[in-house]
Amino acid sequence: MGTIKITINTTQKEYRTPLTYEQLAEEYQQKYAHRIVLAVANQKIRELHKNITRDAEVAFETIADRVGHDTYVRSACMLLMKALSDVAGSPVGGEAAMEYTVGRGYYCMPKGSLAQRVVRMQEGGERIDEAFVAQVKERMLRLVEADLAIVKRAYPTDEAIELFRAQGMDDKVRLFRYRRGSFINVYCLDGYYDYNYGYMVPRTGYLEYFDLIPYKGGMMLLLPDRTRPEEVDAFEPREKFFETLMRSGSWGGKMGIETVADLNDRICGGELSELILVQEALQERRIAQIAGEIADRQNVKFVMIAGPSSSGKTTFSHRLSVQLKTHGLTPHPIAVDDYFVNREDTPLDENGNYNFECLGAVDVEQFNRDMSALLAGEKVKMPRFNFKTGQREMNGDTLQLGREDILVIEGIHCLNDKLSHSLPLSSKYKIYISALTSLNVDDHNRISTTDGRLIRRLVRDARTRGASATHTLRMWDSVRRGEEENIFPFQESADAMFNSALIYELAVLKQFAEPLLYSVERSAPEYFEAKRLLKFLEYFLGVSSEGLPVNSIIREFVGGSCFRV
C-alpha cells in the first residue's frame, strides 16, 4: 500500500495504491458523454486494466474518440471470434477471418471445415445458415452480459507461437516468424486466446453496442460510428463495392498472399519482382477492360472519375487515357479543381476555415455551361485555377470536341450528378477508384484501407509539398470527413470500380514513411497516431522501389513516374 498523486484537468488528487486506470475512469465517467475505454498517462496510452504505479497526469479516451473507437472495434471482433468458437464447439483459429469493412459493417468469412458446417446450399448459391448466425449473436450477448475480463499477458515469442499453433492459428505462427521482439502480447477471454494489433477494452461488458447479420456467405458485424457511438445503424448493402473487394481478395487467395506473413515469405524467397509484374499486369488488364466498356458506349463523352484521397486518381486517369487511345479515342484531361470559386467566395466550415471539399466550393453552373457547350460541339475557353492567388484565370486555353474526342474529368464530386446536372446520363461514364487493400496482418487483424491511403499521402505530401508528417496527420480527420460527405455516399452509382491497391505496396512505402513518422514530436497531439503507424509498419519487410514500373500507381507517391503527377 502506498499513495500516488493523479492530475486530471489541472486538478491534483491523492490516491491509495493499488489503483487501476479503470477504477479511476469509473470515478470520472459521469463527466464524459460516452464510455471511457482508454487512459492517457504522462502522454502514453494505457489500457484500463493496468495499475497506476507512479504520479501521473491522466486524460481519458472514449468510444467517440478515434483511438477509443478503434479499441472498441478491435475488442468486438475478438468477442465475435470467441462466440464463434463457443458455438462451433472448438477453436476456430484458422477457420474464420475478418475480411473487409463495408460501411459500418465488418465482414467475417468462415473458412475450412467451419464453412462446410455452417454454409448450406440454397437456390441461387451458398448461404450461411441464419440459425447459426443467430446462435453466435446470442452467445455474444451472453458474453457481454457476463462482463468477463479480457486478460492481457506478455508471452515469450516461442511460447506464444506454440500457444497459437495449438489453437490452429497458423497465420499467427507464420507472422511471428518476422517478429523482432522477445515478447508478444496475448489476450485471453474465457479460455480463448488471440493476438490483437492494438489496444483492448478490459471487459466484455464494455461491448454492448453491436449487431450480427448473415451476409454473402459470411457474417456482417455491425458496430457504431464514433460520431454516434451508442447507435447501431441498419446495414446498407453496397453490392458493387463488396464485389470489388471480393475480386481483390480472390486474386490474393489464388496468389497465396492473404496476410503480411505471406508477403514476407515471397520477399524472402526472392519472388517479389515477379509478384510486382503480375499485379501491375492485373491492374492494366482491368484498366483496359474499363476503357473497352467506355468505347463500346457510343454516346459517352464524359468519363467522371472520383475517389478518396491518395487513391491514385491522377495516374489512373493517365493510364486510362492511354488505353482509350488504343480504341481510337482522343482523351482530354479536365480537373474539376479548375472550376473552384475564387478564394473569397469559398464556403466556410464550422470552424471558420475554407471548406474546399464541399460542392459549394465549385462553380457548378459555369462547369455545366462549359460542358454542355462542349457536348454541343462549340469551342470553349477553359479556366485554370491559380492555387497561389486563389483565383480562377483564363489563359487562352480552348477546347472543342470532335467525334473521337472524350473528356476524362477528375474530382471528388464526379459521382454526384448535382455537379453535372445538365449533362445527359447517357453521356457520362462514372468510375469510383480507391485503394482497397485485401491484405491482412493475420486472419483476425485486418489492414484498414484508410491506413494504406494515409501512408501513401504521408509519403507524397513530403515529396511534392515538403509537408511534415505532423501536418498530414493533423489534416487527415478533416479529409476523411469530406470523403464521408462527398464521395462514399455515391459509390454505388459508379459504372465501374477500380481498386488501386497493390498487394506489395506497404513493403515499398515503409522505407519512405518510417523516417517521416519518427520525426513527429512526442509532445504533438499526432504522436500517438505516428507511433501506431510505426508499429504497424514493423510487420512488413521493407523493399526498394527501384524495380517498380515507371507507370505504377505507387510511383505517384514515391516518385519516378513517367506521368506528370
Image: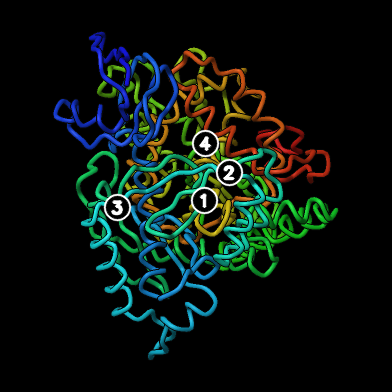
Q: Callout 2: 10 Å neighbours few (<14), some, many (20+)?
A: some
**Mark 2 or mark 4, which has the lower sequence index?**
2
User: Residue 195 — which label?
Assistant: 1
User: Residue 148 — which label?
Assistant: 3
Image side of residue 444 versus residue 315, left or right: left
**Mark 3 or mark 1, which has the lower sequence index?**
3
Q: Callout 4: 10 Å neighbours few (<14), some, many (20+)?
A: some
Q: Reply above or below: 146 against 47.
A: below
Say which of marks 3 and 4 sits in front.
Answer: 3
Q: Could you give the CA–CA distance between mark 2 and mark 4, rounded to whole angstroms? A: 49 Å
Q: Position of residue 187 (x, y in %)?
A: 46, 49
Mark 2 and mark 4 in contact? Answer it, CB < 8 Å.
no
Q: The C terminus is located in which quarter?
A: top right
* Residue under the image location 20 percent in, 49 percent down: 231
**Mark 3 or mark 2, which has the lower sequence index?**
3
Image side of residue 122 versus residue 431, left or right: left
User: Residue 184 — which label?
Assistant: 2
* Residue under the image location 33 percent in, 53 percent down: 104
Image side of residue 247 versus residue 86, left or right: right
Say which of marks 2 and 1 sits in front.
Answer: 2
Considering the numbered disc 3 on the image, is that residue within a helix, a strand or a loop? loop
Q: Position of residue 113 (x, y in %)?
A: 52, 80
Considering the numbered disc 1 on the image, is that residue within a helix, a strand or a loop? loop
Mark 3 and mark 1 in contact? Answer it, CB < 8 Å.
no
**What amino acid does circle 3 point to?**
Leu
Q: Residue furthest left?
A: 30
Front residue of this view, candidates 438 and 413: 438
Mark 2 and mark 1 in contact? Answer it, CB < 8 Å.
yes
**Mark 4 or mark 1, which has the lower sequence index?**
1
Front residue of this view, candidates 365 and 514: 514
